[in-house]
Image (cartoon, rainbow, N blue to C red):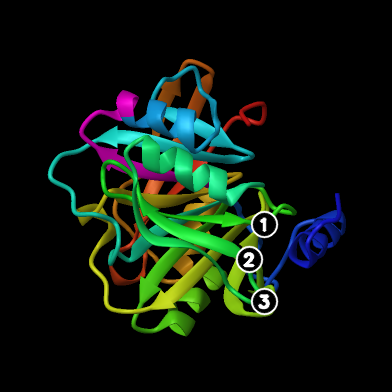
């Protein structure tokens, strides 16, 4: 299968060693999305059955898409994600028409019917049964978990913050959408618009992987990041992780996770 230009660029960069936006910004691996839902197990099952992913970490409330986890925590009375600083998530499928029909039959609400955007791909927007906005696309060269779409009155400023903190390849997806491409083949995109904090919506936070927690704390705080929790350990059935949170721009909650080397 022919790789898209963006994946060729990323693969070539990775073959040369760690990526650097500049000497101070090593690129971090994009790690996860954490959703807030009334019933984590039921939500995870719906995603497993209709969106994809495989069970991971010996848990029934989280799924793995490539190297990216989608995890579900318990929360009540959350706003739909549309309009949040973390507005929606993108997933790619080889047959978009079939996937849209499937998720609609399974309780999702189609908010933008399938259409083809010239120069991009076929796409449709749906809300899952709990209110999370999903963009479903058809890009055969990049299947599975595809992107996180943020929302900001100042897209350029928001992209610059994430690039400064976590590196990545700053480029235009298919020459059309300005974004950042991270190892794991995950795009961070930003659309223009007013927003509300991520913790008020169904997409509670987004996360990157940290090879060493202490080093990442020192580097991020040196760049002006505000820590909202101190590093702490969590024991999972397949190992121990160490994590902490920082305040992202405009109310985005951002987590950094250090995983053991043998944890995917």
Is 39 covered by the magenta stretch?
yes
On screen, 91 above or below 167? Answer: above
Residue 257 lies, with reference to residue 195, above or below; the image says: above
Q: Which residue carries the number 2 mark?
A: 121
Residue 92 in view here? no
Q: Pinpoint residue 133: horizontal percent, then vertical percent.
A: 36, 55
In the image, residue 244 lies at what x, y percent?
39, 45
Q: Mark 1: which secondary structure?
A: loop
- Which residue is identified by label 3? 119
Q: Is residue 208 above or below residue 259?
A: below
Q: Secondary structure at mark 3?
A: loop
Residue at coordinates 56% horizontally, 71% vertically from top-left?
A: 163
Q: Is residue 86 magenta?
A: no
Chain part drawn in magenta: 30-42
Q: Which mark is residue 139?
A: 1
Q: Are marks 1 and 2 in contact (CB under 8 Å)?
A: yes
Mark-to-mark CA distance, 1 and 2: 6 Å
Instruction: Find residue 34 and report its image quarter.
Output: top left
Q: Nearer the viewer, residue 207 or 211?
A: 207
Q: Position of residue 135 (x, y in %)?
A: 46, 57
User: Which residue is painted at 64% across and 64% down in the image?
Assistant: 181
């Amino acid at each position: 299968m022919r790789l898209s230009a963006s994946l060729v660029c990323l693969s070539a960069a990775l073959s040369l060693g760690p990526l650097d936006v500049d000497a101070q910004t090593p690129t971090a691996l994009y790690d996860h999305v954490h959703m807030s839902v009334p019933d984590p197990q039921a939500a995870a099952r719906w995603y497993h059955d209709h969106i994809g992913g495989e069970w991971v970490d010996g848990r029934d409330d989280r799924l793995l898409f490539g190297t990216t986890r989608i995890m579900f925590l318990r929360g009540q009375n959350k706003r739909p994600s549309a309009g949040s600083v973390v507005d929606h998530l993108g997933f790619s499928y080889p047959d978009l028409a079939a996937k849209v029909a499937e998720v609609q039959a399974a309780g999702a609400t189609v908010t933008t019917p399938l259409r083809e955007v010239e120069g991009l791909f076929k796409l449709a927007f749906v809300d899952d049964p709990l209110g999370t906005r999903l963009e479903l696309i058809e890009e055969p060269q990049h299947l599975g978990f595809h992107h996180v779409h943020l929302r900001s009155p100042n897209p350029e400023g928001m992209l610059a913050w994430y690039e400064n903190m976590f590196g990545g390849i700053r480029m235009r997806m298919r020459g059309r959408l300005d974004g950042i491409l991270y190892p794991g083949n995950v795009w961070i995109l930003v659309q223009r618009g007013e927003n509300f904090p991520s913790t008020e919506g169904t997409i509670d936070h987004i996360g990157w992987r940290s090879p060493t927690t202490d080093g990442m704390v020192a580097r991020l705080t040196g760049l002006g990041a505000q820590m909202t929790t101190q590093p702490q350990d969590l024991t999972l059935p397949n190992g121990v992780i160490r994590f902490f949170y920082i305040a992202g721009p405009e109310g985005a909650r951002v987590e950094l996770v250090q995983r053991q080397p043998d944890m995917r």
